[in-house]
Image (spheres, helix red, strand yellow):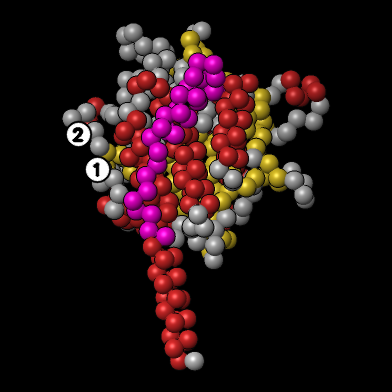
Amino acid sequence: MKIATLQLLFCLVLVSLGLRAQSDVSAISVPLPLLKQHVFALADDSLQGRETGTPSQLTAARYCVKSFRKSHLLAVFRVDSVRGSFYQPFYFTSTTLALFKPRPGQTPVMYKKGELLPAPVTAKDSAQVLQGHNVAGFILGTDRKQEIVVISAHYDHVGRIGGRVFPGADDNASGTATVLSVASVFDSLAQQGIRSRRSILFVLFSGEENGLLGSTYFVNNSPIPITQLVGNLNTDMIGRIDNKHRKHPDYCYLITGSENSRLRRLAEQANKQSVRIELDYEHDTEDDPKQYFSRSDHYNLAKLGVPVLFFTDGEHPDYHQPSDKPEKIEFDLLAKRATLIFQTAWLMAN
């Protein structure tokens, strides 16, 4: 009996050690070919710049949902007591504004200011409003599944201006590709029986270019109580290099809105054990002249007390220009930044 008991204990120890070894994902990276596939698909001219409220935005949404389904994500939005959906529609109106005079040779930067509206009731109402779509999918955690880590990006861009397509490869096909690819990595682990303790909610917003419309609607109509969201990793433009880092391009700007953020420490730990790029906090200040913290979708979650970590490459001359093309994406660097986001998410979810 004693020998049998010792053998059983020994087997249990081996199983425990095996599970711990499985949970060490520090060597896992986000595949560059998958990122490239998504960026080229989303920034293709056939999608006409993915402007929110247009058929091309809905085509992009369907592409993202197809990828989420392939990654075995669960639908998170309720249609009724039985059916779920990957889509969260919202309604809005839009007014076109010019932001500032362009540099010589550049196209004027246009901004379409949007306003959310209630769902139309009549056909006449429907003809006067536009419809956007958020897209989201869910991977269930294990023993802390009620706590949710949100990984997000906006997938819309500015569409066509002056008859020219603005493909938005960096802004924000790069971030969207990252969310889709990170979801695929989490799914690959889940298929091997390796799941994070907390659940992961992957959200792709539209209407960001119209004034954070999609994320505004989402936080006011969240399918999950906001109190269950333990943090948000948001990515917006992570495929290029700004002028500051031209000579040393292995970097990523991180913005938390709090210098003592726990998420900052997790990102630093993830970076140290994986890609080891420079983490630049230049814009993580209240007096940041660029005001990046309030310019992307994480801001709406932060206002409700959700801890956030924003990943970005800053800006470059192709920002909001027809020249923001997929051929200009630095895919090796994008893969490093995407891997940093995955590694940070894994630490956060465990």
Label 2 packing within 10 angstroms: few (<14), some (14-19), many (20+): few
- What's the amino acid at mark 1? Glu
Query: Can you give x and y, in whole percent of width and height, for residue 307 in the image?
Result: 44, 53
Say which residue appears at 40% left-offset and 38% top-offset: 31
- Report helix, strand or loop for mark 1: strand
Amino acid at pointer 2: His
Residue count near mark 1 (Cα–Cα under 10 Å), binned few <14, some 14–19, many ≥20:
some
Where does residue 5 sit, x and y in percent of width and height? Answer: 47, 87
Identify the mark at residue 64; answer none if there is no mark. none
Does 256 appear in magenta?
A: no
**C-beta proximity under 8 Å, tags 1 and 2:** yes
From the image, tell me which residue sits under label 2: 248
Q: Along the line of sight, which residue is nearer the eye, 75 or 94? A: 75
Q: Position of residue 35 (x, y in %)?
A: 43, 33
Asked whether residue 245 is in view, the answer is: yes
Residue occupied by mark 1: 278
